[in-house]
Image (tube, rainbow, N blue to C red):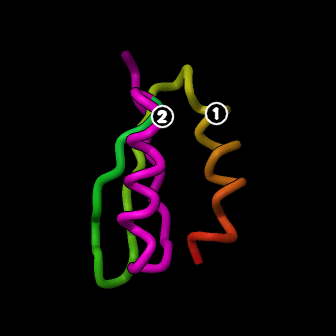
Amino acid sequence: MICKALYLRIAPCRIAYLRFILEGYDGLAILSTFDAGDGIVLVRYPRSSEKDVFVLLGDLAPQLV
């Protein structure tokens, strides 16, 4: 399976929230913290889920800043 990666900058206090949401969608994406202090996270996801990941992140965006 080929995975893609996406770095995001979100509010540091929202990292746990995003991780919780992504874990709820079994196998959709994996969140890793790159720099917790600056709120930089890495989202890895299979290419086949790219559209779903972007739709979900778009919907969550106002809650992550």
Residue, x 64% and y 59% (percent of image)?
Answer: 60
Q: Residue furthest bottom?
A: 37
Residue, x 48% and y 79% (percent of image)?
Answer: 11
The dot on residue 52 is: 1
What is the secondary structure assignment of the residue under circle 2?
Answer: loop
Q: Amino acid at mark 2?
A: Tyr
- Number of marks in picture: 2
Which x, y percent locates residue 47? 52, 25
The dot on residue 25 is: 2
Residue 54: which quarter of the image? top right
Provide the residue span drawn in magenta.
1-27
Quadrant where the image shows the N terminus: top left
Which x, y percent locates residue 9? 48, 71
Residue, x 48% and y 34% (percent of image)?
Answer: 25
Residue 51: which quarter of the image? top right
Which x, y percent locates residue 50? 59, 32
Which x, y percent locates residue 26? 41, 29
State yes or no: discs 2 and 1 in contact (Cβ < 8 Å).
yes
Q: Amino acid at mark 1?
A: Asp
**Along the viewing direction, whichever of 14 and 58 lies nearer the viewer:** 14
Residue, x 40% and y 79% (percent of image)?
Answer: 13
The answer to whether 27 is drawn above or below residue 29 in the figure is above
For label 1, the crowd category at 10 Å Cα-Cα, with few meaning under 14, some 14 to 19 and many 20 or more, is few
Query: CA separation, marks 2 and 1?
Result: 10 Å
Is 33 one of the magenta-colored residues?
no
What is the secondary structure assignment of the residue under circle 1?
Answer: helix
**Along the viewing direction, whichever of 48 and 19 lies nearer the viewer:** 19
The answer to whether 3 is drawn above or below residue 17 in the figure is above
